Image: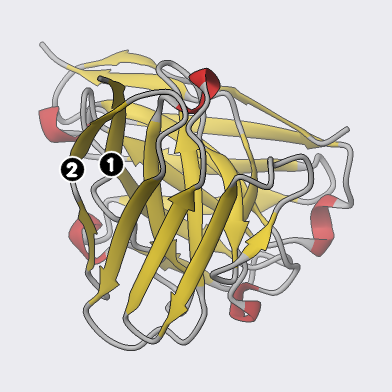
Amino acid sequence: DIQMTQSPSSLSASIGDRVIITCRASQSIGSYLSWYQQKPGKAPNLLINSTSTLQSGVPSRFSGSGSGTDFTLTISSLQPEDFATYYCQQSYALARTFGRGTKVEVK
Amino acid sequence: EVQLLQSGGGLVQPGGSLRLSCAASGFTFNTYAMSWVRQAPGKGLEWVSAITNDGAGAYYAVSLKGQFTISRDNSKNTLFLQMNGLRAEDSAVYYCAKFQTPALTARGAFDYWGQGILVTVSS
């Protein structure tokens, strides 16, 4: 299976901060990388697919970039509703592996 | 509106079996591949299984070693996960999820998720 390594595992940030989360694949996955947001007790919510395609309704402060093995999720100006856990996922292989998650907490 | 309504979870003894269901509505169910993802308490997301839109192809995480069986009934718009030989480490919230693109091989993400259902394996 393709291994997805996310970093950091957690971070503390303040409202208005720029937040960057990275995800590295154990082999090239082209642009087949998605990002999900999950809040406690809720199902994950798809934010971005194909590295940089924002889902309908997702604020433009979220953006994604990268290709091959290295990807980033950027939140340009952190808002109160953005405190959550974020997961990357590759959709290159049938076994849709996830990163271990990055918890974004209040500083 | 797309909805995925899950049922069938609960407490089961080690070695027991359980069948999860996921009733879909709001989209043409027989057009889309579907998947199961689980999340152990306090842990991250783990992909479990996927099935093609027609049910002809089923795929599993290597770690499951034939323990689970995914299936679907397109006449009832329902996805299933049959879990046998359950162990404590199978305790998790299980989610069903819809692929964003119809074909499994189209490399889509999961655009809709069920509400999640808790499976607890304990004596």
Q: Please report the residue visible at 39 percent of the width from the left and 41 percent of the height from the top.
A: A86
Q: On what subunit does the disc labeled 2 rest?
A: A
Residue B92 x/y as whole percent: 29, 28
B81 shown above or below B103: above
Residue drawn where x is 32% and y is 81% of the image: A69
Query: What residue is shown with label 1?
Result: A102
Q: Is A95 left or right of A64, judged from the image as shown?
A: left
Q: Secondary structure at mark 1?
A: strand
Tell me the quadrant of the picture where the N terminus of chain B can be found. top right
Q: Position of residue B106 (x, y in %)?
A: 65, 79
Q: Amino acid at mark 2?
A: Ser
Please tell me which residue lies in front, A84 or A41.
A84
The answer to whether the residue labelled 2 contacts the one labelled 1, judged by CB atoms less than 8 Å apart, is yes
Residue A24 % position (x, y): 26, 71
* In the image, residue A27 above or below residue B123: below
Q: Is residue B13 left or right of residue A74?
A: left
> How would you rate the neighbour count of disc 1 (Cα within 10 Å): few for under 14, some for 14-19, many for 20 or more?
many
Viewer-proximal residue, A90 or B5?
Answer: A90
* Side of A69 where B21 appears, left or right: right
2 or 1: tag closer to the N-terminus: 2
Q: Is residue A69 above or below residue A63?
A: below
Chain for numbered disc 1 = A
Tell me the residue that label 2 is attached to.
A9
Crowding near the residue tagged with mark 2, few <14, some 14–19, many ≥20 C-alpha atoms within 10 Å:
some
Name the colouring of the figure. Answer: secondary structure
Q: Amino acid at mark 1?
A: Thr
Residue drawn where x is 79% and y is 47% of the image: A56
Picture quarter containing residue B79? top right
Which quarter of the image is occupied by the C terminus of chain B?
Answer: top left
Could you give the CA–CA distance between mark 2 and mark 1, rounded to whole angstroms? 4 Å
